[in-house]
Amino acid sequence: MATPDEMVAVLKAKFSSISFDPKPLLMRGEEAGDQIYIRVEPENLVEVMHFLRDDPGTRFEQLIDVTCVDYLNFPEAEDRYGVVYSLLSITHNHRIWVKCFVNDPSPKLPSVIGVWKGADWMEREVFDMFGVVFEGHPDLRRILTWDGFEAHPLRKDYPLRGKGERENYEVVTRDSA
Amino acid sequence: MEKHTYDPHDMSSEDLLTTRLDNLVSFFRKNSVNWARKHSLWPLPFATACCGIELMATASSRYDLARFGAEVMRFSPRQSDLLICAGRVAIKMMPVLQRIYKQITEPKWVISMGACASTGGVFDTYAVVQGVDQFLPVDVYVPGCPPRPETLIEGVMAIQRQVDRDGLKTSQERGKGLGIVAEPTYQVNVEAVADRETE
């Protein structure tokens, strides 16, 4: 069973572009315990994910969650959207957080649906709420908001009460029903 | 025979003998069909949030909506005539609710239960309908967050008053007959109607 330090060493040897110092955006305190946060460039994402799933030292069989953070109002942030992948290794009882940063005007990431099938709805949700496009996703439709909704409501520049989308609906009256 | 109108409540036995059949039918329609209908409302619970829990409490034994004849919760709009919209409605849900409303057969009534269904409540966001009455005809609004079962029962009783007042329109108002044919097959032995309590 690999310790977190061994896992970091393996990753460092294999991928030179991975950053293991994702502060200040990822942690509240100084100590992260034995939790591993790595930052991956979008072009290496699928390759790194395949390695994390298949390597005997890591074995992250399960994709727990895909979510996203909008760093619009963070003065220290260099990039706007941080897409977070939470992975779990059932074999080693380890977790890892993989983060990818993308930017306007067309935030794009390669889809990891070829690595984990379960990424399907998670990536659809991130697309729906933040507008991050996952290239290679077979069915990238909205999943929470309705068809015809234009905006991406969890972006920080979207007003809470919307932009009038809920006013344009059919009205059923006593005569029409 | 001269056509005349009169109040059926003032009938004497002599009057009743000369009553035309259609007047008798409308008498029963007004005084018995609406009475029967208001005590046999079949609600359709459209429960999307915590108001649905109070709705269940209202229907269960402590508050016992069956006392008012509305205990038969039907989950098919084809079988119900009272839509109880309990809880917040997302905009994505609104076409479903509208379709359910259209599928309920006439006559039908709608209760908007609670603050969220009536006004959107605290959920003033891009995805929540700010009052189902913007998109549906609502008969009775029940206040509360969520309303107590007594409040919902008062709402059902308000529907009952509406049903009693104008629940079933006469065939003249509807423009076509109800299809009710009443032909006596035997000689009716008519007796005087006792004094009826007028409303």
Image (cartoon, coloured by chain):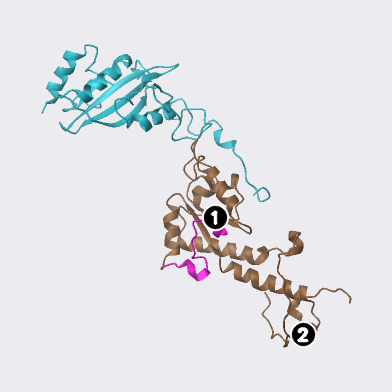
Chain colours: A cyan, B brown
Q: Give the percent coordinates (x, y) of residue A49.
A: 26, 22
- Residue at 73% x, 85% y: name it: B188
Tag 1 subunit:
B
Q: Which mark is residue B12?
A: 2
The part of the image, by quadrant, that contains residue A72 is top left
Neighbour class for label 1 at 10 Å: few (<14), some, many (≥20)?
many
Name the element at disc 1.
Answer: helix
Q: Is residue A173 left or right of residue A152?
A: right
Measuring from the top left, give residue A146's x and y in whole percent: 50, 35
Residue at horizontal 22 percent and vertical 20 percent from the top: A51
Which chain letter matches label 2? Answer: B
Q: Which residues are magenta?
A: B62-82
- Extreme residue toward the front, this view: B185
Q: Secondary structure at mark 2?
A: loop
Asked if residue B74 is among those painted magenta in the image, a careful observer would answer yes
Badge 1 amino acid: Pro
Which residue is label 1 attached to? B77
Foreground label between 1 and 2:
1
Percent position (x, y) of residue A117?
A: 32, 30
Question: What is the quadrant of the N terminus of chain B in the image?
Answer: bottom right
Q: Which residue is outermost to the top?
A: A16
Alpha carbon distance from label 1 to label 2: 44 Å
Q: Quadrant of the rendered structure where residue B21 is?
A: bottom right
